[in-house]
Image: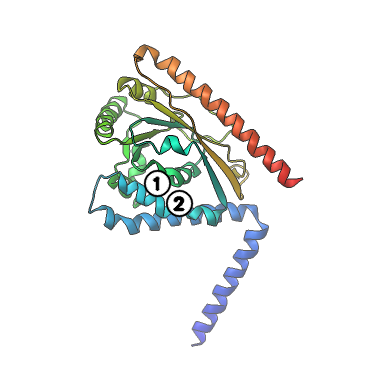
Amino acid sequence: MMMNYFGMIFITIILIMSCILYKTSRTFRYYFKYVIFSLHIGTSTAFLIPIFIFRPRNVKNLRLLAMVVAPITKIIGVSWELRGREILEQDRTYIIVSNHQSLLDFLGMYQIWPIMNKCTAIAKREIFYLWPCGLAAWLGRLIFIDRMNSDSARIVLNNATDYIKEHNIKLWIYPEGTRRSTGTIHSFKKGAFHVAIRNQLPIVPVVFSSYYFLSKREKKFESGRVIIKALPEISTKGLTIDNVDSLLEKTRNIMIDAFNEINREIQSSSNTSSS
């Protein structure tokens, strides 16, 4: 009885100290939010795997996962505003290309996955081994590629493209490759544009505004607002492999303009709120 009493006191003290640290320490908030985010994804995927097993390698599993994970955004204090919803709602196959800033990008994807309905994404092979998340992603037909083996990656991507065309599925690719939150859109790799031209599929750029409230270097993870803007599709009809570079630059320039525009809006509204 006495042990239970002291146990309750200890837990109460821990909770009080955590609340105080959350209010007073930016570093504590940074790690706390990432831990909560990671635990939520881990427990959600572990819970859903038995369901996914009954329909393995089905992209609708990713939609269900997104619906379960998405609400965590309210707890960590990030709000998302989607523009161009009507573009993502189209029931057709196209290649989505998006800027890649942080692990938070995936939470943004989860917000709009139910709108896209049938969608999958390209991911590096190492993610598969991060169980239970990797297993759940595989059961949802996420496409894992070996970035160190271009021939193998090309074969996997070609097979995946045939499948998404047959089943009317959207394909999400991060052409920057690596996550980098530096306030700009970096150079693109050519893979997404080769796939789009080879299969004569349109490209739909999706741009996330800068995560001004998040900084790994400063250990900062505050509340904030993100605009997600889906841009009009870019046709690849009639283009050949010789047009890959020009298509890449055209897409990147359009995304940079949109990125700068929504960032100015975010900054303007932030300044208005603080004044």
Please name the colour scheme applied to the rendered image. Answer: rainbow
Q: Is residue 64 left or right of residue 101?
A: left
Q: Element under label 2?
A: loop
The amino acid sitting under disc 1 is: Pro
Q: Which mark is residue 40?
A: none
In the image, residue 14 lies at what x, y percent?
Answer: 57, 69
Q: Is residue 154 visible?
A: yes
Residue 111: x and y in percent read 46, 46
Q: Amino acid at mark 2?
A: Ala
Q: Quadrant of the C terminus?
A: top right
Q: Which element type, helix, strand or loop, lies under badge 1?
A: helix
Q: How many marks?
A: 2
Q: Residue at x 50, y 57 (%)?
A: 36
- The residue located at (39%, 41%) in the rendering is 116
In front of the other: 18 or 62: 62
Q: Is residue 54 above or below residue 59?
A: below
User: For mark 1, what is the residue?
Assistant: 114
Find disc 2 in the rendering and name its residue: 70
Where residue 206 sits in the image (x, y, percent)? 47, 33
What residue sits 64% from the left and 53% below the top? 26
What is the residue that sits farthest to the bottom in this orientation?
Answer: 1
